[in-house]
Image (cartoon, grey):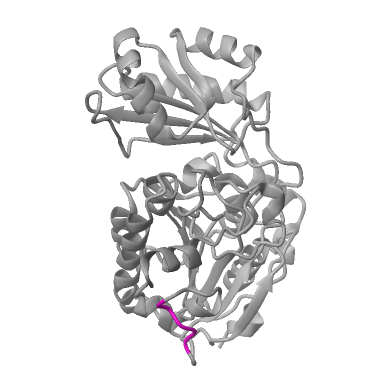
Amino acid sequence: MSRDVDWPVRRMAMNGRLRQAHEVTSFRRAVILVADGVGCGGAPDAADYGDAGADTLGNIGRATGGLRLPNLEALGLGHLTSIPGLPAAPAPRAAWGTMQEASAGKDTITGHWEMAGLVTATALATFPNGFPEPITTALAAAAGRGLLGNKAASGTAIIDELGAQHMKTGRLILYTSADSVLQIAAHEQVVPLGELYRICEAARLIADRHQIGRVIARPFVGQPGAFRRTYNRRDFALVPPAPTLLDGLRAAELEVIGVGKISDIFAGRGLSKSLHSEGNRDGLRLTLEALRTFERGLLFVNLVDFDMLYGHRNDVAGFARALAELDGWLPELQAALAADDLVFLTADHGNDPTTPGTDHTRERVPLLAFGPSVRPAPLGTRASFCDLGQTIAQALGAPPLVRGTSFLAAIAP
């Protein structure tokens, strides 16, 4: 499959959509902070996904005896769901609301793509019973290595189960989850990173034929009984099927900087720069560094630890600590903002660590909008994540998206 990075921009220009750009407003930069997996419950279709009762923030608060997040409380997080220890601020400093996902699914790709204006109407392929023979045969041939596992499993659990056998035989650990993912785990001393990435690139071509959302390289290190996954993970995503907010911003000659796995999620499309991060703390550092250098456009940040380290491992205490770390960092962010900056704090799906499984959970996600000149206002429950992308397009004077309703009028000065 061709991965021509510039085709969406050219297509938009040829369609004349640049002539239909939103009127330029007083905002110069926008920041999306995706707290990966931090849902706030209440999705009307949660039961359809087996997630009735899922409420990441609320359930963590109940399980820990109450959360203490004073900066998030001041922004209005307590208005979004009932969170023990975190009351609804009487006068929030941010505009506050929630978003429901219109796409079919509850994974990283559908959530991020929808923020950028793409609704996935038909769910991407999943393989709860493992991958069929046409996929495994093609993958083994492309990799030049045998396979182990081939089942739905927790990433840490399957490494503990099969890691020693992998180190002895050199066979790759193949697994999936409830999401549309093909994951390949390998020890960095058995399969060098370059080889693992090459194998995953070949797997991406196979996955394209079966509408699998992501191929994920899952390197790990250590010895049996003490294996540890590393931040050398890479995601190889399905190419977005249509232009996104990112493409529109680039067509309008604005910068788009991705922090964390944003570039992987969009298959490299629509970004002017990508900054690899090693977890939340590093992502927060890179966010502040980027704010010191870029002039106009979008800074799109994924904070992966909530999901990868805590949600998928049912680590309630770790999840709560990560929330506190984000809360403690927010004053630094606010001090770094210029008068014409606009920040959105949200999530791509839920990952309730209090539920029995280790998969993502179908939930509403937070929507907090703030900045020096942003007007606090109730935003209600948005019918689609696309509303976020449409608002950013309008705020930055970029072409309007096909989907979504802007709420800029409610928050602009």
Q: Tell me, yes or no, if residue 390 can be seen here.
A: yes
Where, quadrant-wise, is the C terminus in this rendering? bottom right
In which quarter of the view is residue 197 placed?
A: top left
Q: Position of residue 13 (x, y in %)?
A: 70, 52
Q: Position of residue 111 (x, y in %)?
A: 60, 52
Q: Residue at x 50, y 49 (%)?
A: 271
Residue 175 vs 229, above or below: the answer is above
What stretch of residues is rendered in magenta? 85-89
Q: Position of residue 328 (x, y in %)?
A: 29, 71
Q: Is residue 332 magenta?
A: no
Q: Residue at x 75, y 58 (%)?
A: 402
Most common secondary structure along the magenta stretch? loop
Residue 227 vs 41, above or below: the answer is above
Q: Residue at x 59, y 68 (%)?
A: 392
Q: Residue at x 50, y 60 (%)?
A: 56
Relative to residue 343, is residue 209 drawn left or right?
right
Where, quadrant-wise, is the N terminus in this rendering? top right
Q: Nearer the viewer, residue 93 or 223?
A: 223
Q: Tell me, yes or no, if residue 292 can be seen here.
A: no
Residue 277 vs 125, above or below: the answer is below
